[in-house]
C-alpha cells in the first residue's frame, strides 16, 4: 500500500471590506473571512478545506492584498478554480488571483513583511468612504509636522511591546523592524503607511493611535520616544478604530507577492 | 392679533450611500433618507420639520448632490445648524452644506435639471466599490461603440415613456430633454452620464438597461430607436440595478447648485 501524493498547494490573494465580518481568523460565529472562504472551498472540493492566512486582521479591518494558501487537487484549469471560488462569495470578499505554488510555500511563514495603510480624513468622511477611513469632523486639524517627527522616532528596529495589545501571548519576540512609516498628507487626507517584517497584535492601530495623539498635541514626539523605550503598554496609547486600517500587501522573497 | 412671519427657508445639499435605505421618499418603515433627516431636524427644532427634496431616488440609489429645503427659525450661525444636523445622522448620510435661501426657492420646482451617473465595471467589482457600481464579472465585455451609437439616438427632446416605469402616474407630460448622454470608457470601467431637464420615474435605470443590452448585442441601436418611437414600455427594456446609479447634481437657475 502506497501513500497518495500530497495534493498541490495553492496561493490566493484576496481583498475584503472587513466591516461586516468578525475579522480574518475563524470564529465560532462562522462569520470570519476565513470561515466564509473555507465554506466556499469545501463546497467546491466536496470536503473540508482549511486555509492558512498570512496573519489575522481584526474585526472591521480591511485588506487589498491578504494572502492565504491551501492544499487541494484540482483537475481543471486554475482560472476555473478562481471562477468557482468567486461564485458564492459575498461581494465584500474578492479573490483576486490564485496560482499553484511549491509545497514549501507557506502564507504566514514565507512572508518577509507586510504593508498596512491607515486612512484619516480631517473632515466628515464621505458616505462612500465612511467604511474605509477615520473621519475627524469637528476635531482640530492634525499637526502632521509633529507626527512626522514622531514617525522618525518609531521607524527602525525596536521592541514594540509598548504598541501591542496587552494580552499579547505572541510576545516571546517583541522586536520588529519598522522599515517604513510615512505620514502622507493631501487636501483633507492624512495617510499613514507602515511597512515592517512583521506586526505585533494591534501594532498598526496602536502606532496610529499614538501618532493621532501627537497630531492633536496630546503627546509630544519625545513622549512617544519614552513610551517606546518603556517596553510597556499603557493607557496613554489608544488603539485607533479598525475602520481606517487596510492590509495592503504581503511581501514574499522573490518579489512575487 | 398679527400672524407671525414665515420662518426662513433653508437649502441643504447632501450625499448618501443608498444601499441600506428604502429610497429618498418617506416610507412607513421610517427608513427612507427623508425620514432619517426629518427625525434629526425635528429633534434639533423640537417640532415636526418636513423637508422637500429635488425628487425621489429609489431604494439603493445613491446621491452626491441631492438638494432639499425646509422652513425653520434658527437664531444661531448657519454653520452651527450644519454641525447640529450632521451630529446624529448615520455616516451613510452626509449633509454637505446648508444656506439660507429666498422663500420662493423650492428644491423640486426651482430645479432646472439633474445629472445622474451610472457606473459599471467590466470585471468583478472591488469589495470597496461593490455598493456603488454594477460589476460584470463573467459577462462579455460591453461594445461601447454600439452603445455610443444608441446614445446618439436617445439624446435630445423626446417622449421617454418607453423608458419609464409602467405605472407612471406622473406621465401627463412624458417629454424630457436629455441634453447629455455620454458613454465614457476607462480600463475596466464604463460610466454613463445623463443630464436632462427632468427624469421620468426609473428613466435613468431604464436607459441604462437598454444601453447595456446594446453593449451585449441583444439590442441594436436601431432597435433602441424603434423602442423610443413606440412610446410604450415593454419587457424588452430592463431596469438596471439600483446600486450603480448616483444622483450627482441638481441644477438651479443662476448656477448656484
Image (tube, coloured by chain):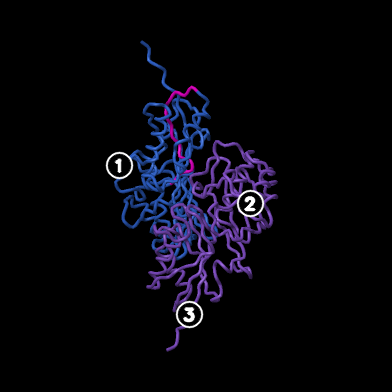
Chain colours: A purple, B blue
Q: Secondary structure at mark 1?
A: loop
Q: Give yes or no for residue B74 being in the magenta stretch.
A: yes
Which SS does the magenta portion mostly show? strand
Q: Position of residue B208 (x, y in %)?
A: 42, 53
Say if labels 3 and 2 share a chain: yes
Mark 2 — residue?
A231
Mark 1 — residue?
B169
Q: Position of residue A8 (x, y in %)?
A: 49, 77
Mark 3 — residue?
A6
User: Can the viewer see residue B121?
Assistant: yes
The quarter holding residue B58 reads top left
Using the image, name the chain to which the residue with label 3 belongs. Answer: A
The quarter holding residue A2 reads bottom left
User: Can the viewer see residue B148?
Assistant: no
Say if labels 3 and 1 share a chain: no
- Residue drawn at (44%, 69%) of the image: A50
The residue segment tinted magenta is: B62-75
Q: Residue A10, relative to residue B190: is it above or below?
A: below
Q: CA distance from mark 2 to mark 1?
A: 70 Å
Q: CA distance from mark 3 to mark 2?
A: 44 Å
* Mark 2 or 1: the one toward you: 2
**Quadrant containing the N terminus of chain B in the rendered view:** top left
Q: Residue A59, relative to residue A42: is it above or below?
A: above
| Chain-order first, disc 3 or disc 2 | 3
Amino acid at each position: 500500500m502506497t501513500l497518495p501524493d500530497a495534493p498541490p498547494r495553492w496561493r490566493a490573494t484576496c481583498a475584503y471590506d472587513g466591516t461586516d465580518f468578525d475579522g480574518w481568523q475563524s470564529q465560532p460565529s462562522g462569520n470570519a473571512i476565513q470561515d466564509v472562504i473555507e465554506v466556499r472551498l469545501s463546497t467546491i472540493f466536496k470536503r473540508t478545506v482549511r486555509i492558512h492566512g498570512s496573519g489575522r486582521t481584526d474585526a472591521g479591518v480591511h485588506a487589498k492584498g491578504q494572502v492565504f494558501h491551501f492544499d487541494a487537487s484540482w483537475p481543471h484549469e486554475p482560472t476555473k478554480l478562481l471562477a468557482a471560488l468567486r461564485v458564492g462569495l459575498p461581494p465584500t470578499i474578492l479573490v483576486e488571483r490564485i496560482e499553484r505554488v511549491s509545497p514549501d510555500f507557506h502564507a504566514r511563514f514565507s512572508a518577509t513583511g507586510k504593508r498596512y495603510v491607515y486612512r484619516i480624513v480631517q473632515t466628515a468622511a464621505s458616505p462612500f468612504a465612511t467604511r474605509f477611513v477615520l473621519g475627524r469632523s469637528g476635531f482640530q486639524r492634525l499637526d502632521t509636522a509633529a507626527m512626522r517627527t514622531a514617525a522618525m522616532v518609531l521607524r527602525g528596529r525596536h521592541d514594540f511591546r509598548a504598541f501591542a495589545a496587552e494580552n499579547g501571548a505572541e510576545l516571546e519576540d517583541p522586536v520588529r523592524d519598522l522599515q517604513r512609516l510615512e505620514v502622507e498628507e493631501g487636501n483633507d487626507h492624512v495617510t499613514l503607511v507602515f511597512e515592517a517584517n512583521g506586526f505585533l497584535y494591534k501594532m498598526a492601530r496602536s502606532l496610529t493611535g499614538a501618532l493621532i495623539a501627537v497630531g492633536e498635541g496630546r503627546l509630544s514626539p519625545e513622549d512617544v520616544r519614552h513610551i517606546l523605550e518603556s517596553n510597556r503598554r499603557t493607557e496613554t496609547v489608544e488603539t485607533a478604530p479598525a475602520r481606517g486600517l487596510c492590509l495592503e500587501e504581503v511581501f514574499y522573497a522573490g518579489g512575487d507577492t
